Amino acid sequence: MAFVLCHDFVGRSSRSVGLMRVSRSGSAVTMVTAEGRASKFESMRKKYGVPRTTETTADNVGFSYEDFESAVSEYEYTLSQGDNVHGRIFDCSSRGALVDIGAKAAAWLPAEEFSTRPVDSPSEYFAPDTEMEFVITSKEDMNGQLGLSVRRLEHQKCWDRVVQLQAEDAPVTVEVIAVNRGGCLVTVEGLRGFIPQSHSGNIAINESEVGRKVTAKFLELDPERNRVVLSHKLAMASTQMVNYGPGDVVQGVVSGVKPYGIFVDING
C-alpha cells in the first residue's frame, strides 16, 4: 500500500491535510484519505462520471517496440549530397529560407543560393508555400539540417540548354554587360560568356555598348572550366547569307589568300 502527502493550496500559501492512501483494484487506481474516506478527486470522479484510467502496459498497447521500429524502417530513406529533391518553402528572409523536404529537420537554403539571377526581394520571389526542386549541397549538420541550392540546379539546366543550342547551331540573344580591350562580356541563357574582339562584328568595343542585346553563335563550350565563347560575327554572316543565292553579285573584302583560294568577307 502506498501513501501520498497531500496539500490544500489557497492563494500563495499551502497547508498539509494529511496522508492519502493509493489503493489498486485490478488495473484501476482509487485514492482515499488516511482515515479511509474517498479523496476529493475520487468524489469528483464519481460525481461527474469520469471513468478510471486503465494502466497502460506492454500487454495492452497492441504492438511492441519491435513492431514500431519495423514500421518506421519501411518509410526510411536516405538523402545524399548532390541529390535533387522536391520541397516546400515555409519561411523566407533576406538571409535565406527554411524548406520542408521530408527530412528529420527543415533544410536551409542560403540567400546566395536563391537563383543564378539577382533576387532583390526574397519574400516576393519565394511566395509562402512555394514548392520547387532543390539540389542538396551539404551533409547533415549536428542538428540534422541539410543545405540546399536553387542556383546550382538552375546553373546545370542552363548548361544543358546551351549545349543543346550549340548542337543545333542555333543563334542566341546575348546582352553585353562589360567591355575590355580583348572583347566583351555577355550573359547568355543565364550564363556568362565572352565575345572576342575578332568576333565582335559590329559591336563597338566601348562602354556605350553595355546593355545592348545582339545575336551570337557558339564558338566553344567547356562546362568543366565554366567557359562560354561566342561570335557575333558568325551570327551576322549566317543571317546575311540567307538572302544570297547562286548568281547574286555582292561586294566583299579579301581577308586572306591561300594557295588553294581566296577568303572574302561579305558584309562582315
Image (cartoon, rainbow, N blue to C red):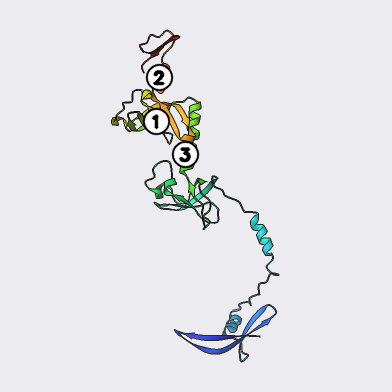
Mark 1 closeness class: few <14, some 14–19, many ≥20 residues within 10 Å? many
Residue 68 percent coordinates (x, y): 66, 61
Q: Please tell me which residue is depicted at 36% across the width and 25% down the height of the picture.
A: 197
Q: Amino acid at mark 2?
A: Ala
The one nearer the camera, 243 or 109, is: 109
Name the residue beneath numbered marker 1: 194
- Calculate the distance from the C-alpha at mark 3 to the C-alpha at mark 2: 30 Å
Residue 125 percent coordinates (x, y): 41, 46
Secondary-structure class at tag 1? strand
Q: Amino acid at mark 1?
A: Phe
The one nearer the camera, 151 or 19, is: 151
Secondary-structure class at tag 3? helix
Chain-order first, disc 1 or disc 3: 3
Name the residue beneath numbered marker 2: 237
Name the residue beneath numbered marker 3: 155
Q: Please tell me which residue is depicted at 61% across the width and 82% down the height of the picture.
A: 46
Residue lying furthest front: 259
